[in-house]
Amino acid sequence: EAQVTQNPRYLITVTGKKLTVTCSQNMNHEYMSWYRQDPGLGLRQIYYSMNVEVTDKGDVPEGYKVSRKEKRNFPLILESPSPNQTSLYFCASRRLAGTFQETQYFGPGTRLLVL
Amino acid sequence: QKEVEQDPGPLSVPEGAIVSLNCTYSNSAFQYFMWYRQYSRKGPELLMYTYSSGNKEDGRFTAQVDKSSKYISLFIRDSQPSDSATYLCAMSDKSYNTDKLIFGTGTRLQVFP
């Protein structure tokens, strides 16, 4: 089954404690990205990656890091989480070839609470 | 002013009704327009995709784009309780490779039996 998986699905942590949210896709997609979703603000892109070792900032990259060492994985790293990073996070992937956007898949989401 | 505006709702309709969901935008460079459906506690899933102006129909769903008015719509005919979800519009300019999508805040729809 084609899917994007994220772990953990729920996470409560404290300010300053480094954490990593993993994202993995089994569709051999070149393109992966991270979004955060907040009430009244919608989905905002944090980082994206067009292929292995190629990453770039989205609209709200401050406080986040990413890496793309393997095609299937795109972890999101919060080096020193702060309460304003409390949010619902989504990973997404798609092929670069083919019709624009038609093959984008979202993961199930990771709900993060930073105390 | 946000680049994409969407009424958050909630919109509550009886089963069988025709639903109209709308977004307005300010960036005239947007060429690609999408509607996503998001069920509670799930990730968004692509519902409809339209390039430039015009209509696109898929079963009970019709997407319309009016670039002159910077206005897009999603119509749902014969709405069902299973259509209850949040509907997000999204759009992008011609920068295919950057995948820069701008999302609306979403409209919550509830269809009651």
Image (spheres, coloured by chain):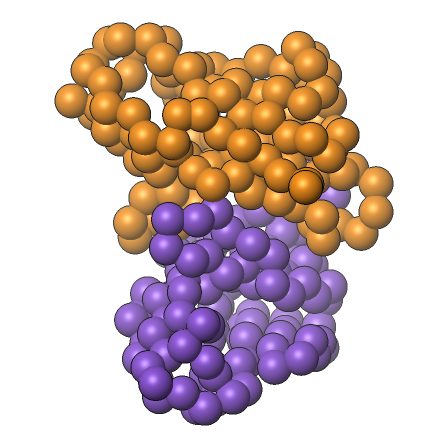
Chain colours: A orange, B purple
Rendered view: A54 above or below B88: above
Q: Nearer the viewer, residue A28 or A89?
A: A28
Q: Residue furthest left?
A: A115
Q: Position of residue B15 (x, y in %)?
A: 40, 87
Q: Residue furthest right?
A: A97
Residue A23 in sight here: yes
Q: Position of residue A40 (x, y in %)?
A: 30, 52
Q: Residue at x 32, y 44 (%)?
A: A38
Quadrant of the drawing holding the N terminus of chain A? top right
Residue A48 in sight here: no
Quadrant in the picture for residue A3:
top right
Q: Residue furthest front?
A: A1
Q: Residue at x 37, y 55 (%)?
A: B40
Rendered view: B52 above or below A56: below
Quadrant in the picture for residue B90:
bottom right
> Horizontal placement of B33 versus A59: left or right?
right
Quadrant of the drawing holding the C terminus of chain A? top left
Q: Residue at x 32, y 30 (%)?
A: A10
